[in-house]
């Protein structure tokens, strides 16, 4: 960037421009994300304790149950799947590599059989051997505990029975403990299956692990770290796994620099930022309050990293419940929200969107279906006979995602178009499980999505395929169930390669979904990582899926 920008508060566009200046020359884009990361000189720089100021968004610290950025950011260095990702900046971070497996899977010519072999000599953090049979037991445990990830494994032969009974074994997964061989048989080809094998839901835990939430009594781990203790909404202590040997992983899994990570959980973004800048914490996981962005730019520009991960923030509308069972009402909400106003709520660190997919995806084609039009929104509400309808908006108290403000904004908008709207704000730690439970009967609410893996199936199959709606831990908060769109998703799932033709079809799915308007997408958020002055940011690694990599940071 050649132009020199002098910082001052000039509104949303200028905030983006000024923070973009910090990121200039510090990284590139990819099909899954663009980052402001640089450096990555992470080897041989161990230190005693990395202190992290965390927000209240941890849902679980059980690999079978957690489905938040907060949980996965901790656990990807604790619980290892058979496959994983390179611990590097930029596009190469999306590269799949073998973790617990010796090599990437051998796939049969018909795309239905995946074969891997477990590395020899692996041990859990408690010293017990890792066995090939732990893999099928792990997936079976997911079903027994009603994991939000079970939909990922529905294409495995034999999962239909365990999905109903929560007992027994999955016939489509066989494991030989003597040889370490693991074989997985699918019902139909699945283009994203290797990515699914790299999720935390597939991270191996001992076959003896209890079929219940183990967040506060962590099961043994396979990664460079283990969870020593977890006090919800207070603190997490992460220590080294005494039985981890990085040399066994061919450089794919780093041993990590901090000997310990102390994660202090705060309910206030301002306190977290102040403690970090004053040196009481090393890193602030929170997004900084809007009124302190100028301070960060003017005084602490060399202590921050600006990034753009693959994300979409949106309002979901439950298509099963009035008034949002009427497409006119859902379209009215899309016309009524002023996305530029929402960008300002996020301190200017965002771009407006009407798409499901983020713009960094090659399948993205910008939609302009719902330009801001309050009069049209009011007329649609009237035409739907919904004027005066009672609506409860759900949101959480997470300031990092500006969820309270986003909920308040929506409440004002819905009132302005003739709906009788009230706001219900709950704790972020239980928000997703609450709105993901059909018994809650949420009508409309705040949501966001950060990619699990860089493939459109992670958006449309997980979030909008009616065939994956569940009673609990439901990720399709809109309960969107369109048979034609379901069929298109299922057909594209079988495509092994994302060709230009396939990408174009995914763009068509994005448009078809938004014409039905189960969501009102509004921004793709940018983020800021803030550190104290003792941290060496030449070691900073921003991962395309897991964001800032705690394990690879180092002190000056």
Image (cartoon, rainbow, N blue to C red):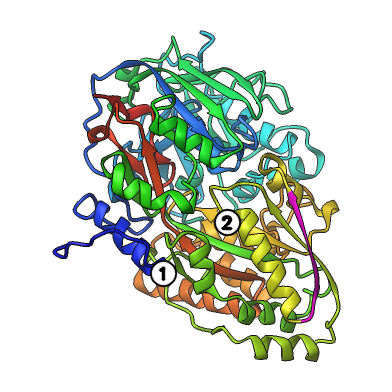
What is the magenta range? 418-425
Q: Which residue is drawn at the image coordinates 37% and 27% (left, top)?
A: 551
Residue 350 lies, in percent from the top left, at 44, 62
Residue 464 lies, in percent from the top left, at 63, 64
Residue 339 lies, in percent from the top left, at 53, 73
Is residue 218 visible in the rendered image? The answer is yes
Estimate how packed mark 2 is, as few (under 14), some (14 to 19) or many (20 or more) residues with alpha carbons within 10 Å: some
In the image, residue 199 sits, relative to residue 524, either above or below, namely: above
Closer to the chain start, of discs 2 and 1, is: 1
Magenta stretch, main secondary structure class: strand
The residue where tag 2 is placed is: 448
Depth check, front residue: 419 or 308: 419
- The number of discs equals 2
The residue where tag 1 is placed is: 363
Q: Which residue is drawn at the image coordinates 42% and 67% (left, top)?
A: 12
Residue 257 lies, in percent from the top left, at 33, 21
- Would you say residue 335 sits in the magenta stretch? no
| 384 relative to 157 in the view: left or right | right
Q: Quadrant of the N terminus?
A: bottom left
Callout 1: SS: loop
Q: Which marked residue is nearer to the observer: mark 2 or mark 1?
A: 2
Distance between the alpha carbons at the discs numbered 2 and 1 = 19 Å
Is residue 481 visible in the rendered image? The answer is no
């Amino acid at each position: 960037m050649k132009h020199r920008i002098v910082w001052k508060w000039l509104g949303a566009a200028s905030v983006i421009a000024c923070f973009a200046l910090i990121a200039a020359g510090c990284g590139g884009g990819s099909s899954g994300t663009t980052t402001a990361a640089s450096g990555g000189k992470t080897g041989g720089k161990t230190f005693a304790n990395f202190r992290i100021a965390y927000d209240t968004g941890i849902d679980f610290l059980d690999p079978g149950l957690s489905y938040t950025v907060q949980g996965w950011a901790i656990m990807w260095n604790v619980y290892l799947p058979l496959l994983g990702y390179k611990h590097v900046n930029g596009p190469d971070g999306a590269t799949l590599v073998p973790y617990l497996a010796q090599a990437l899977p051998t796939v049969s010519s018909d795309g239905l059989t995946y074969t891997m072999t477990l590395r020899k000599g692996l041990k859990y953090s408690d010293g017990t051997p890792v066995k090939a049979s732990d893999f099928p037991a792990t997936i079976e445990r997911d079903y027994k505990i009603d994991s939000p990830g079970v939909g990922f494994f529905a294409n495995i032969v034999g999962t239909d029975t365990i999905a109903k009974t929560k007992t027994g074994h999955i016939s489509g997964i066989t494991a030989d403990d003597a040889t370490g061989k693991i074989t997985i048989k699918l019902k139909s080809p699945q283009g994203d299956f290797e990515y699914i094998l790299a999720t935390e839901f597939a991270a191996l835990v001992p076959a003896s692990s209890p079929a219940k939430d183990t967040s506060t009594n962590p099961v043994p781990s396979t990664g460079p770290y283990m969870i020593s203790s977890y006090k919800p909404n207070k603190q997490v202590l992460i220590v080294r796994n005494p039985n981890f040997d990085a040399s066994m992983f061919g450089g794919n899994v780093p041993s990590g620099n901090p000997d310990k990570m102390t994660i202090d959980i705060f309910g206030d973004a301002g306190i977290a930022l102040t403690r970090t800048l004053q040196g009481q914490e090393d890193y602030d996981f929170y997004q900084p309050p809007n009124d302190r962005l100028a301070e960060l730019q003017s005084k602490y520009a060399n202590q921050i990293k600006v990034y753009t991960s693959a994300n979409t923030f949106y309002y979901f509308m439950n298509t099963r419940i009035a008034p949002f069972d009427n497409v006119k009402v859902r379209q009215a909400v899309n016309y009524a929200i002023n996305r530029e106003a929402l960008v300002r709520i996020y301190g200017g660190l965002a771009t407006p969107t009407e798409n499901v997919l983020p713009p960094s995806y090659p399948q993205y084609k910008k939609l302009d279906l719902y330009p801001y039009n309050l009069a049209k929104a009011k007329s649609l509400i009237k035409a739907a006979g919904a004027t005066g309808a009672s609506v409860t908006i759900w949101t959480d108290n997470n300031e990092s995602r500006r969820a309270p403000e986003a909920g308040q904004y929506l409440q004002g908008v819905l009132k302005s178009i003739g709906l009788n709207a009230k706001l219900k704000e709950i704790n972020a730690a239980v928000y997703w499980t609450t709105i993901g439970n059909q018994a809650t009967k949420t009508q409309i609410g705040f949501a966001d999505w950060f990619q699990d893996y860089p493939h459109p199936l992670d958006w449309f199959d997980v979030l909008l395929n009616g065939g994956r709606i569940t009673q609990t831990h439901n990720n399709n908060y809109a309960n969107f169930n369109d048979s034609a769109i379901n069929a298109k998703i299922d057909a594209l799932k079988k495509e092994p390669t994302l060709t230009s033709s396939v990408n174009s079809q995914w763009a068509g799915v994005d448009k078809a979904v938004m014409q039905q308007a189960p969501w009102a997408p509004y921004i793709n958020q940018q983020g800021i990582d803030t550190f104290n002055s003792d941290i060496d940011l030449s070691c900073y690694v921003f991962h395309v899926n897991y964001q800032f990599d705690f394990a690879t940071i180092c002190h000056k």
